[in-house]
Image (spheres, rainbow, N blue to C red):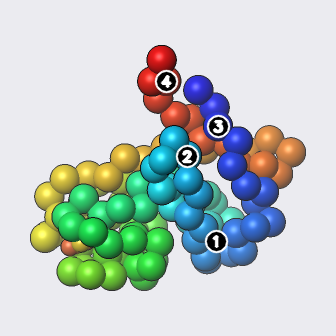
Amino acid sequence: MKVKTINISEISENSVKVVNVDDKDIAIFNVEGDFYAIDDLCSHAEASLAEGEVFDCKVECPLHGAEFDLKTGQAVTLPATKPVASYVISIEDEVIYLEMEDNA
Ligand code: FES
């Protein structure tokens, strides 16, 4: 199911916005004009990945420093061992859509 979120103009280059879809916070990153979406909640403990530092298409959790691949959600360094969900993005008429699993 495709879910409409925000306009690309709302996320300036090299910044991030958190959107709430189905009661889940999803962080949408703009990395040099490319967009990536992963769960905002770190898989290790309660931290917002949107508040982390982004480099090399990865985000570093602000709490304990685990790094996650923005493309896949994979945890690439400890202390996180589990991935976070990543979402397929499509952009139509400058609006970002996320491909969400259908719960029905
Ligand atoms: S909460 Fe993210 S690494 Fe611990």
Q: Which residue is mark 4?
A: 102
Of all residues, the one furthest to the right in this rendering is 93
User: Looking at the picture, which amino acid does disc 1 mark?
Assistant: Glu
**3D distance between C-alphas at marks 3 and 4:** 10 Å
Circles 3 and 2, Cβ within 8 Å, touching? The answer is yes
Q: Nearer the viewer, mark 1 or mark 2?
A: 2
Question: Could you say which quadrant of the image residue 69 lies in?
Answer: bottom left
Q: Nearer the viewer, mark 3 or mark 2?
A: 2
**3D distance between C-alphas at marks 1 and 3:** 23 Å
Give the secondary structure at mark 3. strand
- Numbered circle sitting on residue 3: 3
Give the secondary structure at mark 2. strand
Q: Earlier in the sequence, mark 4 or mark 1?
A: 1
User: Looking at the picture, which amino acid does disc 2 mark?
Assistant: Val
**3D distance between C-alphas at marks 1 and 2:** 24 Å
Query: Which quadrant of the picture is home to ligand 1?
Result: bottom left
Query: The N terminus lies in which quarter of the figure?
Result: top right
Query: Residue at horizontal 75%, vertical 67%?
Result: 10
- Numbered circle sitting on residue 32: 1
Q: Which residue is mark 2?
A: 21
**3D distance between C-alphas at marks 4 and 1:** 30 Å
**3D distance between C-alphas at marks 3 and 2:** 8 Å
**3D distance between C-alphas at marks 2 and 4:** 12 Å
Residue 40 in sight from this viewpoint:
yes
- Numbered circle sitting on residue 22: none
